[in-house]
Image: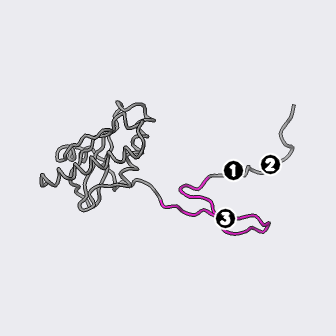
Amino acid sequence: HQEGAPGPQAPSGEGTQAPDGFVIATGMSGRGTPRPSVAAMPTARFRKTQRVRRRGEFQTVFDQGVRIHGRYLTVVMAPASGALSRLGIIASKKLGIAVSRNRAKRLIREVFRHHAPGAGRPVDVLVMPRRELLETPYEAVEADFRGACRRALARLGASGR
C-alpha cells in the first residue's frame, strides 16, 4: 500500500490555455530554456452584427426575399436594412442530431465568411441545409452556396427589390 507524499507538493505544470492564441518562444529564461509568450491570432468569430437573430428579422427575409434551391441547401435572400450582409441558419431536427446540426452550421458559417454575397449592396441571407450537406466535401458545399447566392442576387436585381 502506497500513501501520498509526506509534505506539501507543488501544483502540476498544467494550466489554462490562452484562447485564440498560440505559444511562441520569445526569449530565453535565466536557465537557458525558451520563455513562451502568447501571440494573438486574428479572431474568426461570427459577430452578432453578421447574424440574422430575431424572429421578426427572419420573417422579414422570408416575406421580402427570393428563395433558391441548391443541391445541398436552400437560400432565401433579401436586401439588408443595415450596412453589412448578414447570415441566418435554419437547421431543423430533420437534419439529424445536435452534433450534425452544429456541424452543418459551422460549415455554412465558414462558407459565408469566405464568400459573403452582396459586395455592392448588403443582403440578409437565410440558409436551410439539407441532410446531404453532411456527407459532402467542403468544396462542393462552397460551390453550391456561391451558385445559389449568384442566382438569388440576379433575381433580386431583376425584381428591383
Badge 2 or badge 3: first in the primary sequence: 2
Camera-nearest residue between 20 and 132:
132
The residue type indicated by label 1 comes to Glu
* Label placed on residue 14: 1
The reply to whether discs 2 and 1 touch (Cβ–Cβ < 8 Å) is no
**Residue 30 colored in magenta in the image:** yes
Q: Is mark 3 on a helix, strand or loop?
A: strand
Question: Could you tell me residue 50's position as x and y percent?
Answer: 34, 54
**Residue 73 colored in magenta in the image:** no
Cα separation, mark 1 vs mark 3, equals 18 Å
The residue type indicated by label 2 comes to Gln
Q: Name the residue under label 2.
A: 9
* Label placed on residue 110: none
Q: Residue at x 28, y 60 (%)?
A: 119
In the image, residue 136 sits, relative to residue 9, either above or below, namely: above
Q: Name the residue under label 3.
A: 25
Badge 2 or badge 1: first in the primary sequence: 2
Q: Residue at x 66, y 68 (%)?
A: 26
Camera-nearest residue between 77 and 7:
77
Quadrant (top left, top right, bottom left, bottom right) of the C terminus: bottom left
Quadrant (top left, top right, bottom left, bottom right) of the N terminus: top right
Question: Could you tell me residue 69's position as x and y percent?
Answer: 25, 40
Give the extent of the magenta segment.
17-42
Please rate how many residues cluster around mark 2, counting C-alpha atoms within 10 Å: few if below 14, some from 14 to 19, many from 20: few
The residue type indicated by label 3 comes to Ala
Relative side of 68 to 143, left or right: left
Q: Which residue is drawn at 42% across and 31% down?
A: 97
Question: Could you tell me residue 138's position as x and y percent?
Answer: 42, 45
Camera-nearest residue between 106 and 146:
146
